[in-house]
Amino acid sequence: MDAVQGTLDELGTPLQEVTFVVFDLETTGGSAAEHAITEIGAVKVRGGEVIGEFATLVDPGGPIPPFISVLTGITDAMVMAAPKFPEVLPSFLEFIAGAALVAHNAPFDMSFLKAACQAGGYPPPANPVVDTADLARRVLTRDETPNCKLATLARVFRSSTEPCHRALADAKATVDVLHGLISRVGSLGVHTLEDLRGFVRAPTREQQRKRHLTDGVPGAPGVYVFEDARGEALYIGKSSNLRNRVRSYFTASETRSRIREMVGIAERVRTIVCATALEAEIRELRMIGATKPRYNRRSRFPERVVWLKLTNEPFPRLSVVREVRDDGAAYLGPFGSSRTADDARTAMHEALPLRQCTERLSARVRRPACALAEIGRCGAPCEGRESEEAYSRHAGRARHAMEHDAEAVFSAMEARMRRLADEQRYEEAAVDRDRLAAYVRTAARMQRLRSLTGIPQMVAASPAFGGGWDIHVIRYGRLAAAGVMPRGAHPTPYVDALVATAETVTPGPGPTPAASAEETECVLRWLDSPGVRLVQVDGVWSLPAYGAGRLVGRIERAYLHLRGDRREGRPLR
């Protein structure tokens, strides 16, 4: 028999023979765990021809947020008679059977589809998936398009349908974008579905060209810094194996567009070897906070946290501040934003009749009371209705709620949420739930931090790779020293030497006196890890018996109940 040379088409499914289902979902929010689908639209195409469409509104099982209605035009009245997604899902799964799925920003749409399948008892779709947003970032240059949003790409490829945040219209626009992108990649040797999916995953030319930057990187724990030609830090990371981690940036496994862009700019990789993985994690945090590399997103601005302060004055009040001072005041935090701090303050005001005015009050000077006094939300010390001694009891309860026991605030907010749920005011109950969560989670976090930051010195050890021990000296929640004790060595000389050479730490005021909250949390996670042994503790390591940590689980259940069935009015259990 004569040998026959195989063709390229035999290496995969030719694109002209692939059935694509291009789909889009409209939802009530951005989280598949917390939000629901309001509309689904899909177009089935093969060989450039439309062979079917699928479109329906969906009852999300709860009210559509107003800003979503403004964005999509889908209102509660429109979905009132629509089927719920479990009724739509079997038909949609039949519609996509045997097809490759296409979506713009596919991870978002697929997350909702997978969540719906899981809730309905169906296996997640095994269809191959193509993301037109990811493909566009690989194909198009900044000269051709300023961004890869669907509306922008629809104009670039002159789509006959304008995207308008309605599912079927956006799916039709995505079809035109898909065809435009396929015509582009055809000249790059992409002729099959397998080629198309591999094209997105393949390392860029810049990644391939700069693999030499990994030469000489050690296989040890530490921190790596990508730098540009001027020596400016572009991106900082950490790893327990520097060689393996740095090399991964130059392979197909690195799919983040921003990081691929960073690799294209980088001219060198500088590494700092650390004694332990914890030291590497802490150094990474400190270096990111100090240099603020533009390609790092997390931990760049530790100084931007805010605090909720119970002021130290004759009639204290709750104030959102950016600095912790040594002034005898009580502080709750840190919060990531002023809005979250204000949510926690609102929750505390529900339980405690603290004044909410910002003027400085005196027991000798009288002022007219505000409306809060008339509705019983303030004791009106400004008008003299409440003495300084009586008001100080409210302030004492507030300090206790911030530092020790969150039950008073929790109970007051719980009662309000139940009342709102009984009145079917679920959106208001959800707002109060978020306020309570801001307070409880932050109080629990702060109490956990203070349990460590109040200890002048702690020495702890964990099993190291190869049979030795990783040893760390922690002072006021800050990592002061790190070292490795070889297997079989006597611990006393190593511990003594590490303590003697450890950083001198002078604590400042507040719950985080010597390090950022994020650093102390890294230390706490390590202390909680299996196998850690306490060697020395100068002080007592403990949490409040009735601390806020015991209420965090109830907050999480509140989210599940309000998300799972708002119509039954079960904010807390």
Image (cartoon, grey):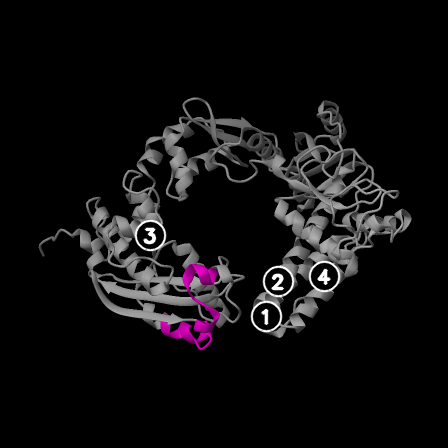
Q: Which residue is mark 1?
A: 566
Cα distance, mark 1 to mark 4? 17 Å
* Membership of 72 in magenta stretch: yes
Marks 3, 1: nearer the viewer: 3
Residue type at mark 3 is Ala
State if disc 3 and disc 4 touch (CB < 8 Å).
no
Residue at the image point whose x is 69% and y is 35% from the top: 323
Closer to the camera in the image, 300 or 454: 300
Residue type at mark 1 is Arg
Q: Which residues are magenta?
A: 68-92
Q: What element does badge 1 sit on? A: helix
Residue type at mark 4 is Met
Label 4 CA crowd tier, 10 Å (few <14, some 14–19, many 20+): many
Residue 90 point in image, percent of width and height: 40, 74
Cα distance, mark 4 to mark 2? 11 Å
Q: Say which label, 2 or 3, has the lower sequence index.
A: 3
Residue 314 point in image, percent of width and height: 85, 42
Q: Say which label, 1 or 4, has the lower sequence index.
A: 4
Cα distance, mark 2 to mark 3? 33 Å
Outermost residue to the bottom: 81
Quarter holding the C terminus?
bottom right
